[in-house]
Each structure stands twice: as C-alpha cells, then as structure tokens.
Amino acid sequence: MSDDESTPTPAPAAETPVLATPPPAMDLFSAVKDVLKKALISNKLARGIHESAKALDRRQAMLCVLSTKCDEPAYTRLVEALCTEHSIHLLKVDVEAKTLGEWAGLCTIDKEGKARKVVPCSCVVVKEYGEDSEGVDYILNHFKGGQ
C-alpha cells in the first residue's frame, strides 16, 4: 500500500485573491516623462536651445517639448518656426524649466534618489523614441487627435 492511498489529502486552502492595483491612467505629463526617460537612456535627446535648434534644422527630431513658462519670446518663436517649417511635432507643456530639465536628465541624483543641482531647460528635442512604450503611443495618439 502506498502513502497516497492511506492518508487523506487535505483540501487546498482557499486562496484569497490579491488585487493588484491597476497602473494609473496615462496622462500627458507622465507620457512625456516616460518618453524623455526612454530617449535619455538611448542617448537620443537634444537639450537646450543650441542643441535643439541644430536637431530641428537638420530634421533629426521626432518630437519637440517646449515649456510654456519660457521667459524669452524669441526663443519660443524660433522653436515654433523650426517645428512648423520641418513638420515636427511640437508639444507645449505647462511646467517650469527646472522641471523639464529634471525630466531631461540635467541634474544629479543624490543617495536618497532626489534630484539635486537641476539645470533649467525650456526646450528638449527627442531624436528617437528609444523602445516602444505606452507613453510613445499616448503622445502619437495625442497628435492624431485621439485624446
């Protein structure tokens, strides 16, 4: 006689389902942060007016992110004109230049994971999106008029 036949098997305990919290719905700011992070990892960002203007004029850009809180009107007009002339997507975000600089990686990260010494940046150009992500899809749908 084997052990399987002589001992009764206890019924498996009812497992309580663990409810995983669904990821938060993607909004424009989180999509921009995601796209900038992926492009930064693949080293395909142009940050600042000089790098951005060169990338826009050479038609290397896929997306241009411009802060609406830029103080210099000539700066804004130049970026808008280059994007319009070369049919490049321009996304104006309502954030401070320091926040955009932090998103673009123009800062140092301390031991606690907080950004220190953030350099302000009013314009960031994405030359390539890097890997496909939900943020890229959200932004492309935004330009198609889906949002």
Image (cartoon, rainbow, N blue to C red):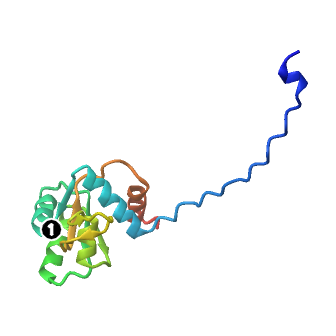
Viewer-closest of 50 and 62:
50
Give the quarter of the image for residue 96. bottom left
- Is 121 on the left-hand or right-hand side of 9? left
In this view, 93 is above or below 40: below
Placement of the N terminus among the 4 image quadrants: top right
Quadrant housing residue 109: bottom left
Secondary element type, mark 1 = loop
What is the tally of numbered marks visible in this picture?
Answer: 1
- Taking the view exactly as shown, the residue that stands out farthest to the top is 1
Q: Position of residue 130 (x, y in %)?
A: 30, 49
Question: Residue 34 at what x, y percent from top left?
Answer: 36, 60
Query: Which amino acid lies under the numbered mark 1 shown in the image of this protein?
Result: Gly
Residue 105 vertical position relative to residue 121 in the rendered view, above or below: above
Q: Residue at x 61, y 57 (%)?
A: 20
Rendering quarter of residue 126: bottom left
The residue beneath circle 1 is: 48
Residue 56 point in image, percent of width and height: 16, 61
Q: Residue at x 20, y 74 (%)?
A: 122
- Residue closer to the observer: 89 or 3: 3
The local crowd at label 1, few if under 14, some if 14 to 19, many if 20 or more residues have their Cα within 10 Å, is some
For image coordinates 84% across by 21% down, the residue present is: 3
Q: Give the residue at x 17% y 64%.
A: 47
In this view, the residue in front, 86 or 107, is: 107
Q: Position of residue 69 (x, y in %)?
A: 25, 82
